[in-house]
Image (cartoon, grey):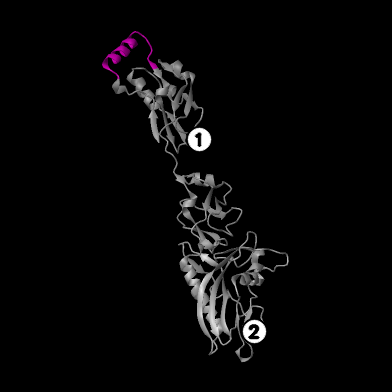
Amino acid sequence: MKHFSLKKAACFVTAAAMLFVMAGCQLGKKVEINLADYIKYEFTGYNGDGVLTYEFDYKDLMDDLEENKIKFDKSDVKDTVKLTPDKTEKLSNGDTVTFDIDIKNRLENNVKATFIYEAFEVTVDGLEDRPVFDPFAYVKVIYTGVGPDAVATLELDGNSPVRGIRYKITSENRGRKLKNGDKITVTASVSSSKGIEKVCADAGYTLAAETKEYTVEGLDEYATSINQITPKMIEDLTKQATDTFNSSIGSWASDSKLNKCEYAGLYFLTVKDGVNNSKKNIVFTILHINCTTAAGEFDYYFYVAFNNVVVKSDGTNEIYKITDVQYPRGSEYSNNAIKKGSGSNRRYVIGYTDVEALYNDAIRKNSQYYNIENNITGASQTTETTASETSAETSASETQTTETT
């Protein structure tokens, strides 16, 4: 804020000038008095919303009349000057304000001086910029869940200098079904009919923005590519798959022996766009099994399917529901039973003679609802789809139990 007076400081008038004025008085010439010199004005408020206040200093005018030996009656001076500025509000630095000056006849008729009262201009300056209020500095977006099914909520910190601010997620997705890279929009508002901008102005602030867009990041997400399955994850899947295979056997016959149970690769299924399925991905861990029995040697393949593998925000993986696994089950009469021998030496295992047979029986039917990848050397990449194929949700839950004797 600044306070101004247009009057020239009398103390800087030189002795020569004083002598000149006195000589003029002696010669009968009237003293000239510029009434603009007695206007005091002040700019207050903030840049863009400044206010002009002003007054005419009659005491200062009468002091100067006395100093110049000009006789007057106070009633002939007091309340004789009318000031009319062309604007007084919503002022910004650099604006120009024009004053019109009118006087009453008794001032000119009764006071022996020449009064100058032409219109004059002043330039607005000295107004400070209003501090900026960013409503989004006082709210946090919190993400919960796993992408692409994560949910955004808002958390206020309670320290906002402007009271009554409300927040809402206004983007089309409403803060739901989120994955990394998605955008959400948050809008700040107030219940007052004044609107948020006026409420902020009343509190002494300029509103930075009513909306803000956020980019979703830092979410754990369901794996969408086989390339996201790390070597460490393959190691964990293989161990769990091996444990599951051994549990499915129950016990080996006394004349049977497990020679090999090793990782052979993965089939990775990820749900297609537009498909609503609780199983966002399925990882078929393929085991290559070799065993010796009384009926001879069996060399075959077995799978253990894990659902919802998650890529964590730190880059590691985990099985979302490690207990929700599927594997081939059945008896000697199942279509996935491999049989050898006869009589008392008859033996069978539950599995598949090759990876192609495993794919055709257990995986191919999922292709209507899932994209399928694999890292198995020589395995088929074909994922044919027919109208008669069942849903992945159903097929994944109806595989058969493995039994080996």
Give, as a single range, the part of the protein colored magenta: 13-32
Which residue carries the number 1 mark?
A: 90
Q: Which mark is residue 332?
A: 2
Q: Earlier in the sequence, mark 1 or mark 2?
A: 1
Q: Nearer the viewer, residue 238 or 141?
A: 238
Q: Nearer the viewer, residue 182 or 173?
A: 182
Q: Position of residue 1 (x, y in %)?
A: 40, 36
Residue at position x 59%, y 86% in the image: 295
User: Which quadrant, please, contains the C terminus?
Assistant: bottom right
Inspect this view and state whether residue 222 appears.
no
Residue at position x 61%, y 53% in the image: 172
- Disc 2 marks a residue whose amino acid type is Glu
For disc 2, the neighbor class at 10 Å (few under 14, some 14 to 19, many from 20) is some
Residue 284, image quadrant? bottom right
Residue 123, image quadrant? top left
Q: Nearer the viewer, residue 60 or 350?
A: 350
Q: Residue furthest right?
A: 388
Q: For residue 145: magenta?
A: no
In this rendering, the answer to whether 230 lies above or below 188 is below
Q: Residue furthest left?
A: 15
